Image (cartoon, grey):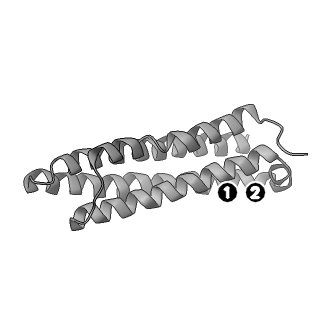
Amino acid sequence: MLYLWLKAFHIIGFVAWFAGLFYIFRLYVYHVENRDKPEITQLLAIMERRLYRGICWPAMIFTATFGVALFVQMPGFYMAQGWFHAKLLGLLLLVGYHLYCGKVRKDLAAGRCNLTSRQCRLLNEVPLVPLLLIVIMVVVKPHLGG
């Protein structure tokens, strides 16, 4: 029963983390499109900071905490599964994207971000790749490797 509770909280954190990551670059699109309007970019910078620090980071930590708790229930099982290693690759991609979102946020706040709104729109779709990888690995559990 503990395992199911850990899994439920892990999924809740994962959903919240993705909600933040899918929304943050949408804010960056608006920020970039309104660079010449300080009254708008100041408000967006506050929203971006609150989303990144108040939702994305806590949700990532929440997800990781319950993910580790799940792992320690059966580490030998997980380490022997090829799908789990692929899931970890998706997780690494996701953490890298998360950190990149923070860099862009700081660059926007400092006025040194050179991304276009089109680039921000494209970057907004990046978390879909690890999402697909992670969900497929965990749900389908394909046989990978020897």
Q: Residue at x 28, y 54 (%)?
A: 48
Q: Which residue is mark 1?
A: 68
Left or right, 129 with reference to 99:
right
Q: Residue at x 63, y 37 (%)?
A: 135
Q: Is residue 97 visible?
A: yes
Is the C-beta separation of discs 1 and 2 under 8 Å? yes
Left or right, 81 with reference to 15:
right
The quarter of the rendered structure image containing the C terminus is top right
Q: Nearer the viewer, residue 29 or 114?
A: 114
Q: Is residue 139 above or below residue 28?
A: above
Q: Amino acid at mark 2?
A: Val
Q: Is residue 136 above or below residue 79?
A: above
Q: Amino acid at mark 1?
A: Val
The quarter of the rendered structure image containing the N terminus is top right
Measuring from the top left, give residue 58's x and y in whole percent. 45, 56
Measuring from the top left, give residue 77's x and y in whole percent. 85, 49
Measuring from the top left, give residue 47's x and y in whole percent. 25, 52
- Measure the alpha-carbon separation of dots 1 and 2: 6 Å
Which label sits on residue 72? 2
Q: Is residue 120 above or below residue 108?
A: above
Measuring from the top left, give residue 99's x and y in whole percent. 46, 61
Q: Residues within 10 Å of mark 2 (few under 14, many from 20)?
A: few
Q: What secondary structure is found at the residue carrying circle 1?
A: helix
- The residue most toward the top is 140
